[in-house]
Image (cartoon, grey):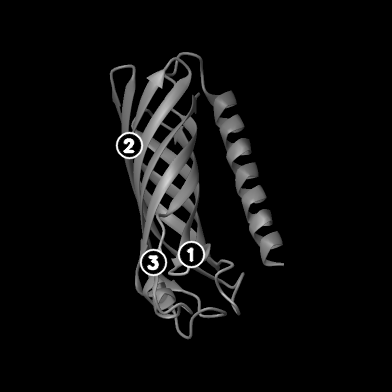
Amino acid sequence: MRLSRLLIIAVLFLSCLIGWSDTMAIAQTPAKPKRSHLTFSWMLPQFSGSAIDALYASYSYPHSYDLPTNGFDLHLLLDMTNSFYLGMGMGYGWQNFEGDDGYEARDFSVMDLRFTFGMLLPIGGILSLYFGGGLNYVILTLGDNWDPGEGWMEEGLGLSFEGGMDFYLSSVCLSVRLNYTYVPELSADEIFLEPEDMDIRSIILGAGFRF
C-alpha cells in the first residue's frame, strides 16, 4: 500500500513535468533564447531536525554509525519572461545504517516534491543563474533497519529555497544547484508520538537538456 502510494505520486509528478514542458516548448517562439531545462542529477543531502534526532535516539543497536547519504534529483525549470522562472523538482535521498558487527541496512529515505518561483539571470549566451523559493511536500519512510517499523511513513508540507547555475553546451545543460527544504511539522501517524520538524540541505550536480 505504501509502495503503491509512492509510485502513484511519482508517476503523477512525472506526468506533470512532461506535460508542462511540452506545453511550454510549443508556446515558445524560435527567436526566444532557450533557457528552460530538464535535468537529472546526483544529490548529496544532509538531513537534520528533531525528526532525525528522534530516529537516532531509537536505534536498536547501542553502538552504530550512519553511512554517507545519497540521492538523485529531477528538476524542471521553465523560463517565463527571460527574468523569471517557474520550477518543479523531485528529490529522493536516503541514509544507510551500520552496526559494530558489520550489519548494514537502509535506515530511512525521504521524497521531496518542490514547486518554486524565482529570478533568472542570463550571463552571455552560455550561463544562467537562478534563485527562487516555494512550497514542498515531503514523505519520510523508515527502511529495513526497523523491526517493527519498516515502511512506516510520515509526511508534511514546508518551504523550499534553491539557487543554481546552468552552463550550456549547445542543447545540453550542465547544472549545479543548492537546495534547502524546511518542514515545520511532519505528521505523527506512524513513526512519531508528536509532530517533528526536519531540514534538508542538498548539493545537486547534474546534466540534461535545454529547450
Which of the 4 image quadrants contains residue 203?
top left
Q: Which residue is mark 1?
A: 102
Front position among marks 3 and 2: 3
Q: Which residue is mark 3?
A: 65
Q: Nearer the viewer, residue 164 or 131?
A: 164
Q: Residue at x 44, y 14 (%)?
A: 170
Which of the 4 image quadrants contains residue 198?
bottom left
Q: Residue at x 43, y 25 (%)?
A: 173
Q: Residues within 10 Å of mark 2 (few under 14, many from 20)?
A: many
- Where residue 90 appears, x then y in whole percent? 51, 48
Locate the N terminus and report the quarter of the image it occupies: bottom right
Q: Amino acid at mark 3?
A: Tyr
The mark tally for this picture is 3
> In the current view of this chain or complex, which residue is farthest to the front?
101
Q: Residues within 10 Å of mark 1 (few under 14, many from 20)?
A: few
- Where residue 133 appears, x then y in whole percent? 36, 50
Q: Is residue 96 left or right of residue 168?
A: right
Q: CA distance from mark 3 to mark 2?
A: 36 Å
Q: Element type at marker 1? A: loop
- Contact between labelled residues 1 and 2, with CB atoms less than 8 Å apart: no
Q: CA distance from mark 2 to mark 1?
A: 43 Å
Q: Which residue is mark 2?
A: 130
- Where residue 189 appears, x then y in whole percent? 56, 80
Q: Nearer the viewer, residue 25 or 11?
A: 11
